[in-house]
Every structure is written in C-alpha cells, then in structure tokens.
Image (tube, helix red, strand yellow):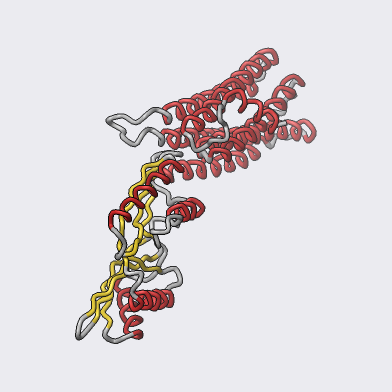
Amino acid sequence: MVFILTKLLTKIFVKDSENTKNPDVRAAYGNMSGVVGIFLNLCLFVAKLTAGIVSSSVSVIADAFNNLSDAGSSVVTFLGFKLANRPADKQHPFGHGRYEYVAGLGISVVILIVGVELMKSSAEKILNPDAVTAVSLGSVIILAASVAVKLWMFFFNRSLSKTIASTALRATSLDSLTDSIATTVVLAGWLISVVGGFSIDGWLGIAVALFILFTGFNTFRDSLSPLLGNPPSAEFVNDIRETVLQDEMIVGLHDLIVHDYGPGRCIISLHAEVPCDVDILKAHDAIDLVEKTLERKYNCTATIHMDPIASNDEYTVELKENVADKMYEINPQFSIHDFRVVRGDTHTNVIFDLVIPFECDLSCDKITYYAKEKIREIDPKLIPVMQIEKSFVE
C-alpha cells in the first residue's frame, strides 16, 4: 500500500523521477514530502481537535496540537528544499544546497524538544498520578487512526529519503515514527489502566521520551555532520576513480577531495598522474576531457592537477614498489604518491608523499623515523624526503 501510494504521488509531483542527481528532481521530492505532510497533519489536527472537544478529552486536544506542530515541521521540510534549489548568487557562489541539511537540523531539534517535554510531563505524572478515567471509544478510534497515518508517513518519507539520499527526509520519517510510538503508548497505557485499575502512563512516557531523545540526537548528528564536512562514500570515490582512469593517458590519481555544497552540488579536485615523456598539450587535452566528463556525470565543478611521473624508468618504478611495500609493513593503510628520485654520487633522495589514516596512533616523528629505517633496508644510500598527509576520502 505504501509503495503503491508513493509511486502514484511521485508520478503526480515529480517529473523525470529517476534522475535523482538533478537538483530540480530532488527539490520536487522534498516539496512532495512537505505538501503531503502538511495536508495529513492538518487533517489529523482537525479530527483530533473535534473529537477532543466533543468528548471533553484534554489529552486528545493536546495530541491535536502536537499534530499542528508536526505540520510546522512539514513546512520546514518544504521550505528547506525550496531554498536549497535556489540558484547560485553573488553572496553564495556555490548555491544554496546546504539548506536541505539545515532543514534536517531544524526537524531534529523539534524531535528533541518533544522528547524533553514528554520527559517533563511523564515525570509529573509519576510524582502526581492522575485518577484512572475511562476514555471514549471515539477518542480511541481517532488515536488508532492517527497511529496508522503516522506509520504510513514514516514509511513514505523513509522511502523518499533512500531514493534521494536525504538526511532531511530521514529526519522527517523518524519524526513520524516517534509520534506513532508515543500515541501507541498512550493507548496501551489507557488499556492497562482500565484493565488493571492503576496508571502507568508516567513510566511508559519516560520510556518513550528516552527513545525520542535518542532518535533526535542521532538525527541531529546526521544532519549536522554534512554541514561540518563528511568524507565522500567509498562507492562515490571508486566511481570517480574508475571514471578518471578510463582515459589511457592517466595512469593514477591521488589527493582526491570532494567539497560538498549540498546533495547533488559538489566540487571535485584531484591530482592525475601522466607519463612525463608524453606531449604536454595532449596530456592537458586529456585532463580537460576528463574534467568535462566528471562535470556532466556528477553535476559538479571538477579541477584536476596534472602530475608527471617517470612511468617508463625501470629503476624508479621498481624503487617505488619497494618503498610502498616498506610503508605497508609499518601500517597496511599507508600509501604513497608523487614519487620522484634525485640521484647523486654519495646518496639518492627519494621524494614522496605518505598518506596515513586519521585514526593512526603513531606521531609524525615516529612515522618519519620508522620510514627512514625501512627505506635504509632497501639501500643505505637512500634518503627519504617525505610529506606526511591524511586522506580526505574513506
């Protein structure tokens, strides 16, 4: 049912729905989520408010206004995607795509506020328990229907978040899930109170509040992380690597950096290795073609620095392999690039960049010491000249 309705709504709201890398398509998905959320939450607000007034149920009326605040969260989602799709301007030359992350951050804050408020009200119920009172059948039906609608919204938004890899829609889906769980606990507490003659609303509320706070913290972290700067996924890095290396003139790449300016908006920079003895104009033309390929494929801006390497010098190639093996012995995650050799009568300088993982326990001084010892094992005349750096990709 969720899949069928999602497909139907996607057909109505989203043109070219398969092209999820296109910012306009992403915006259409986000707008659809916002419009559906606003409509359903307003319907729940009106239904619960009416039932609460008719049955004189304060709890149902309170839940109605909770749905009104959820409609506000859907407005945040809608505006977040609208603002994210605005074109670049003088003040924001790389566009406004990060508004989508800000929207997810705002929704996660709402989840945290709901968790804190529920924690406070639940603690008050434990300290000052209410007398057990019957609840009208109409109120129960309204609350049960609310759970079903909120569960549908959870699966709907979760499906959309996976389709376009959106942290904002993931936060929206979890917001709906916490609402459905909270309402379910209210119904369960009422049933237990009626059957057992005692109230456990407060304790159930504490449990739900802890779950909501846990969910809110995770969604806040997931929304904040891309604003601070995440590394690109391994799949994205491998795809870029395969695209670049399709050109026969490029024999390797390193120093890959992906600057994220919002989903579907990024800047890719890297160093491409080309043989030092090829025609420089042909090499430059190859680099230009690869840049254009990356820009078309990923809707990005691509900048490639050309690094000439001595790929036909047997001594250099063999020495590079030996040095790489020695660095591997220090740590299997170590790698080298920009390898050059300057020979002299008394010694030979081995110049290279050594890439280490962020979680490496060794200090740079210790790494330098171990690297020198390992390279001397190859030939005592070799003098390493290293630049130690950390990778910007996973």
- Can residue 238 be seen here? yes
Residue situated in front as seen by the camera: 32 or 254:
254
Q: Nearer the viewer, residue 268 or 293?
A: 293
Q: Quadrant of the C terminus?
A: bottom left
Relative image position of residue 125 (x, y in whole percent):
61, 33
Residue at left 68%, top 28%?
A: 5
Q: Is residue 95 left or right of residue 129?
A: left
User: Which x, y percent locates residue 248?
Assistant: 42, 58
Q: Is residue 9 above or below residue 127?
A: above
Give residue 164's position: percent from left, percent from top.
54, 38
* 175 sits to left or right of 223: right
What is the x, y in percent for residue 334?
Answer: 41, 69
Quarter occupied by the N terminus: top right
Nearer-the-camera pick, 202 or 30: 30
**In this view of the protein, can residue 120 be seen by the observer?**
no
Give me the residue at 39% from left, 59% from top: 250
**Residue at the limit of the structure toward the left, as seen here:** 345
**Residue located farthest toward the right when viewing the structure as drawn:** 195
Q: Give above or below for 279 relative to 226.
A: below
Left or right: residue 161 compared with residue 349: right
Direction from residue 64 to residue 369 in the image, left or right: left
Q: Measured along the vertical axis of the image, is residue 293 above or below residue 33?
A: below
Q: Quadrant of residue 361?
A: bottom left
- Tell me which residue sits at (39%, 74%) in the image: 324
Q: Give the residue drawn at x 38%, y 33%.
A: 96
Residue nearest the observer in this picture, 277 or 209: 277
Q: State the count of labels.
A: 0
Q: Where, by quadrant of the figure, is residue 66 drawn?
A: top right
